[in-house]
Image (spheres, rainbow, N blue to C red):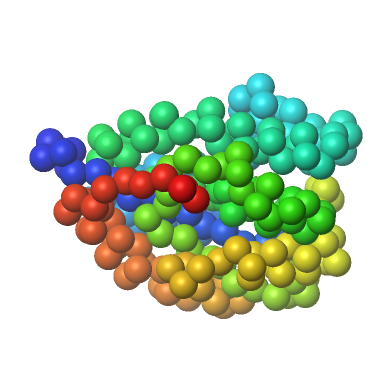
Amino acid sequence: DKCSNGSRGALVVLEGLDRCGKTSQSTRLVKKLEELGYPAELFRFPDRNTVIGKMISSYLNSDSQLDDHTVHLLFSANRWEKRSLMESKLQSGITLIVDRYAYSGVAFSAAKGLDIEWCKAPDMGLLAPDLVLYLDISPEKASERGGYGGERYEQLEFQKKVAQAYQVLRDASWKIIDASLSVEDVEEQMRGILLDCAKTCRNGKSLSQLWL
Ligand code: NYM
């Protein structure tokens, strides 16, 4: 068993605009890791299965209205309610592929005009990712992909603002993936980077905290 020597899994986050392909790529990466002998699981935020997640889901479907700050804090709380579970999975040797994380929280709220520092504050102290993969696609191209599903935020003008907020947020450690290519070619760009990261974590890199 991979965990018997105490080595941990990697925390890998996929970020990007709506319709950038994160969800199908996350599923593929979990399968690929498993094939290569790295136990892996998929997490996604928002996690709509919790009580808080159901409030978020209702807001996204426009079944409820919430103040921008309120919903921002709900998204953050939804990550906090998974923090200890994520930590124990990582410590037991499981690599987590996470479809959206705190960066989505900041980018989408900043796109509404909220202050970036205010947006970051509630997520400080969450587990810091070992790797952030940014699936880069133009808002125009993303909007052409099978159309948007009609949820809140799925509009071209808003997505342009989200893209700008991600630009402000990203740092040199992020890996920028060309997400305009085929599913196979997008995965190909990520595979090597992902395996390097999984190896580094297995070899004892320690977990750290976000934005502290
Ligand atoms: N979203 C997601 C936020 O606004 N803040 C967050 O913290 C997170 C995690 O929710 N348009 C937005 C981005 C998406 C929407 O996500 C639902 P998904 O990946 O479509 O289920």
Residue drawn at the location 69% of the way across and 33% of the way down: 74
Residue 20 or residue 171, whichever sits in front = 171
Residue 146 or residue 175, whichever sits in front = 175
How many numbered dots are placed on residues in this image? 0
Q: Is residue 125 above or below residue 10?
A: above
Q: Is residue 97 visible?
A: no
Q: Position of residue 204 (x, y in %)?
A: 19, 50
Residue drawn at the location 11% of the way across and 40% of the way down: 5
**In the picture, residue 21 is in which quadrant?**
bottom right
| 1 displayed left or right of 145 | left
Residue drawn at the location 71% of the way across and 69% of the way down: 164
Residue drawn at the location 12% of the way across and 36% of the way down: 4
| Quadrant occupied by the N terminus | top left
Residue closest to the far top: 51
| 1 displayed left or right of 86 | left
Q: Position of residue 45 (x, y in %)?
A: 59, 42
| 208 displayed left or right of 122 | left
Q: Is residue 193 visible?
A: yes
Q: Is residue 58 above or below residue 185?
A: above
